[in-house]
Image (spheres, grey):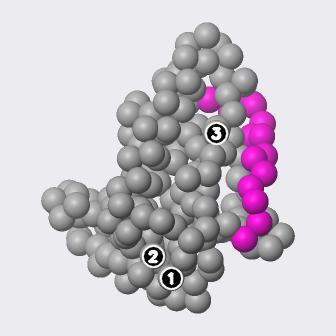
Amino acid sequence: MAPNSLSAGRMHQHVPLDPDSLYVCTVQLATGAFHWAIIITDANSRAVRHHWYQVSGRPYAETYGSQTVTPATRTGNSAVLGYYKLEGYVPCLDFIDICRSVFTSHATVDENRAHNMTCRTWILQVLMGLYDKGSFPGRKENRTEFISLVETKIKTMSTQADNNFLTLFYQSLVHQYHPPVLSL
């Protein structure tokens, strides 16, 4: 079994998230690589994932999509590396429009990468748009500092979580893994 796979027989453990919040979630892809997504919760903590992902059978290689999700310790066979709550978030009526307008995909994934279009850079662009619309009014950082802080901390914490997961995996203790839920 590869390090990023889990036994199909194990149940996903629910991870409670705060209501009316914005989280950046990272999911293990390959060692050292993560899929980034935004999770928005409503007043009842119902979660919707917003992300930039690969599609097939369309004229574009990748697109924005959203799905209602149940936050858990893993998604499919991949470990969730963390739910990182961005403090001070105020919902934005233009959120979906921002998500849809950040990138226009190229025909291939390679073209997207050549233009620095990834799930991570999509998230950062969405956060810039939200910052510009006033969705983080209590933040002390300017927009550039805020985006840099979010990117650096999430990369660092996701790498640590990935290492923790792999350590447990190699010790056959992966069932003990629980992703961090932290505030930034």
The residue located at (44%, 70%) in the rendering is 127
Q: Residue 52 appears in which quarter of the rendering?
A: bottom left
Placement of 127 over or under 171, stated as above or below: below
Q: Which of the numbered marks, if any, corresponds to residue 131?
A: 2
| Nearer the observer, 3 or 126 | 126
Residue placed at 67% from the left, 66% from the top? Answer: 21
Query: Extreme top residue here?
Result: 171
The residue at 72%/71% (across/down) is: 20
Q: Is mark 3 on a helix, strand or loop?
A: loop
Residue beneath disc 3: 180
> Seen in the image, is 95 located left or right of residue 9?
left
Magenta span dominant secondary structure:
loop
Q: Name the residue under label 1.
A: 134
Around disc 1, counting alpha carbons within 10 Å, would you say few (fewer than 14), some (14 to 19), or many (20 or more)?
Answer: some
| SS class, disc 1 | loop
Neighbours of disc 2 within 10 Å: few (<14), some (14-19), many (20+): many
- In contact (CB < 8 Å): disc 1 and disc 3: no
> Of all residues shown, which one is farthest toward the right?
44
Mark 2 and 1 residues: CB-CB less than 8 Å, in contact? yes
The range drawn in magenta is 6-20
Mark 1 or mark 3: which comes first in sequence? 1
- Residue 24: x percent and y percent? 54, 57
Identified by mark 2, the residue type is Tyr
Separation of marks 2 and 1 at Cα, in angstroms? 5 Å
Looking at numbered disc 3 in the image, what kind of residue is underneath it? Pro
Kindly report the distance in space between the C-alpha atoms of the residues bearing marks 2 and 3: 25 Å
Query: Looking at the image, is mark 2 or mark 3 nearer the viewer?
Result: 2
Mark 1: amino acid: Gly
User: In 3D space, how far apart are the residues under numbered discs 1 and 3 (Cα atoms)?
Assistant: 27 Å
Q: Please state which of residues 102 and 133 is positioned toward the viewer in this rendering.
A: 133
